Image (cartoon, rainbow, N blue to C red):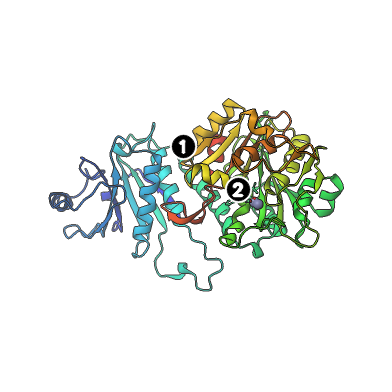
């Protein structure tokens, strides 16, 4: 979809206005219509008189003006209260705009960005949020449908923004950031939605390679032999139950500059399907375990976005990719394996596999890359969903500044993130009778004990763990996040990286 920000007056543009968005704020006249033809204003006044317009957030109304042939149609959208207007309201509103015009023969949508819609210093944040909402809502995953919906006649091709006053400034880089970060999130959603038989570990690596090639980043990987020879037994003990070989994917992006840049490593759980292994899961809902690589998808999407945007950061992406299956050679509950860092792990439950593959990936990442910061993302525990529902992801970190920066970014990007407590008593639950540590901590506090398990494999680097099991996919469609994989984390991380202090 094309995005344009225009200096001109929308009502003086040549040709027809196919679809004009009219934001309706509580207790205010419809926004951005100061320059509208008198006839149109009269029609709107009538609508207001008849109480046809609603500022409620969930409301939209399509209206075909009689008086002004130049304006083909209006889509009036409830924007709520002016005081509570924020970036997420704008995203949701524009998601509704896209859904509303989808069945209509509309190629372009125009919005006058009036003063009331400004969030922050200039108009760019407002426009950026509208762009994000529109692009994220316009997504559909029909790669496996023989009839594509996209083949219908007219599709939305362009969003046109008209900043309300002539002096208004709009930073195009901000708008571009929104556009690319939304596209990066869609890459993650595509990966997440792809069924597991089409996205086994090596296929995931192939996609990562393609995407890095396209964005100008580096790609490399370790195959099964290399993983074994290095002694990544924790990773291998998950992979061995599957006929599909595992791999460890590395992506790297470094802009050309002599300046010393912060070096950040992102590590994503890439379980392309999680049956639970020998500790097999119940069959109801097991199909959702194709989403168990959404942490990996977020890392790949972020790498792509950071490279495309040319962010001033040296970024490493690491994805341990495996399929967790109960094959003949699968790990048995009670088995003890020695991880890459030398610690021994008693595998009590083979369904707690994400932490096992992340363990070796974290050790390797810290040792070989020596990053300034490590962040991992993983659909790690059902317990995270019990704790937070499908609203927020869980954050664990002992680094206060890092936690705060991530939560600020989450606030900006509209991807809620909430901290879990890190009392040492939780860590104690992982003590094993037979090994240094066991891979589960018992029935309760599972998201926290899982995070503490990972902490055994990060030595001294500032580190944050994001359990995204609660938000990585939706059962019901949410406004701009849609049904299926959400791409959670991509826009959050890009926002955080863009703000990273150098
Ligand atoms: N991939 C799952 C976590 C998960 C479950 C995410 C449901 C989203 C929805 C993970 O590998 C897992 O199975 N975790 C177990 C751990 C338990 C055995 C300690 C869990 O959370 O039940
Ligand atoms: Zn599992
Ligand atoms: Zn899993």
Position of residue 83 relative to residue 272, above or below, is above
On the image, numbered disc 1 is attached to which residue?
Answer: 412
Residue 228 seen by the camera? yes
95 or 63: which is nearer to us?
A: 95
- For this view, does 25 lie left or right of residue 142? left
Residue positioned most to the right: 229
Residue 421 coordinates in the image, percent (x, y): 57, 31
Q: Is mark 1 within 8 Å of ligand 1?
A: no
Q: Nearer the viewer, residue 100 or 31?
A: 100
Name the quadrant containing residue 162.
top left
Q: Nearer the viewer, residue 307 or 430?
A: 430
Q: x, y percentage for residue 1?
A: 45, 55
Q: Is residue 14 left or right of residue 407?
A: left
Q: Mark 1 touching mark 2, by CB under 8 A?
A: no
The secondary structure type at the circle numbered 2 is loop
Q: Going from the N terminus, do you reach mark 1 or mark 2 first? A: 2
Mark 2 Cβ inside 8 Å of ligand 1: yes
Residue 418 in the image: state x and y as whole percent. 51, 36
Residue at image coords 20%, 40% = 27
Q: What whole-number distance in Å separates the C-alpha atoms at marks 1 and 2?
A: 22 Å
Which residue is painted at 38% across and 40% down in the image?
126
- Residue 136 placed where, x, y %? 46, 52
Q: Quadrant of residue 501?
A: top right
Q: Label 1 crowding class (10 Å Cα cut-off): few <14, some 14-19, many 20+?
A: some
Number of numbered markers: 2
Q: Quadrant of the C terminus?
A: top right
Residue 303, numbered label: none
Vertical position of residue 244 compared to residue 311: above or below: below
> Which secondary structure, mark 1?
helix
Q: Is 143 located above or below residue 420 in the figure?
A: below
Q: Which residue is mark 2?
A: 379
Q: Nearer the viewer, mark 1 or mark 2?
A: 2
């Amino acid at each position: 979809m094309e995005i344009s920000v225009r200096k001109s007056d929308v009502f003086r543009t040549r040709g027809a206005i196919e679809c004009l968005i009219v934001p309706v704020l509580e207790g205010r006249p419809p926004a951005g219509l100061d320059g509208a033809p008198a006839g149109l204003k009269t029609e709107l006044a009538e609508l207001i008189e008849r109480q046809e317009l609603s500022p409620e957030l969930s409301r939209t109304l399509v209206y075909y003006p009689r008086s002004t042939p130049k304006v083909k149609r209006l889509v009036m959208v409830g924007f709520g209260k002016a005081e509570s207007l924020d970036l997420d309201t704008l995203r949701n509103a524009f998601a509704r705009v896209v859904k509303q015009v989808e069945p209509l023969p509309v190629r372009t949508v125009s919005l006058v960005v009036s003063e009331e819609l400004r969030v922050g210093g200039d108009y760019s944040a407002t426009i950026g949020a509208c762009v994000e909402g529109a692009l994220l809502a316009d997504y559909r995953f029909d790669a496996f449908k023989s009839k594509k919906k996209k083949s219908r006649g007219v599709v939305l091709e362009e969003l046109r923004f008209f900043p309300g006053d002539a002096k208004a400034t709009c930073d195009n880089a901000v708008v571009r950031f929104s556009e690319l970060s939304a596209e990066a999130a869609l890459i993650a959603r595509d990966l997440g939605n792809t069924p597991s038989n089409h996205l086994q570990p090596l296929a995931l690596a192939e996609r990562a390679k393609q995407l890095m090639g396209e964005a100008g980043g580096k790609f490399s990987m370790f195959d099964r032999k290399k993983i074994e020879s290095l002694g990544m037994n924790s990773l291998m003990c998950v992979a061995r139950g599957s006929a599909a070989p595992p791999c460890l994917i590395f992506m790297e992006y470094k802009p050309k500059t002599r300046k010393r840049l912060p070096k950040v490593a992102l590590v994503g759980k890439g379980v392309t399907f999680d049956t639970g292994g020998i500790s097999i899961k119940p069959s109801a809902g097991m199909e959702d375990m194709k989403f168990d690589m959404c942490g990996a998808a977020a890392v790949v999407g972020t790498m792509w976005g950071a490279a495309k945007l040319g962010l001033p950061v040296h970024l490493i992406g690491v994805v341990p990719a495996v399929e967790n299956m109960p094959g003949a050679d699968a790990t048995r509950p009670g088995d003890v394996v020695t991880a890459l860092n030398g610690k021994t792990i008693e595998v009590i439950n083979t369904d707690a596999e994400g932490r096992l593959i992340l363990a070796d990936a974290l050790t390797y990442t810290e040792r070989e890359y020596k990053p300034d910061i490590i962040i991992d993302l993983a659909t790690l525990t059902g317990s995270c969903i019990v704790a937070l529902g499908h609203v927020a992801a869980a954050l664990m970190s002992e680094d206060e500044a890092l936690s705060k920066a991530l939560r600020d970014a989450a606030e900006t990007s509209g991807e809620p993130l909430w901290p879990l407590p890190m009392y040492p008593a939780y860590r104690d639950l992982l003590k094993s009778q037979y090994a240094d540590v066991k891979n589960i901590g018992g029935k309760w506090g599972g998201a926290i004990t899982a995070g503490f398990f990972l902490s055994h494999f990060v030595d001294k680097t500032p580190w944050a763990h994001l359990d995204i099991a609660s938000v990585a996919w939706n059962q019901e469609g949410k406004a701009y996040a849609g049904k299926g994989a959400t791409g959670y984390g991509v826009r959050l991380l890009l926002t955080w990286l863009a703000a990273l202090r150098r």
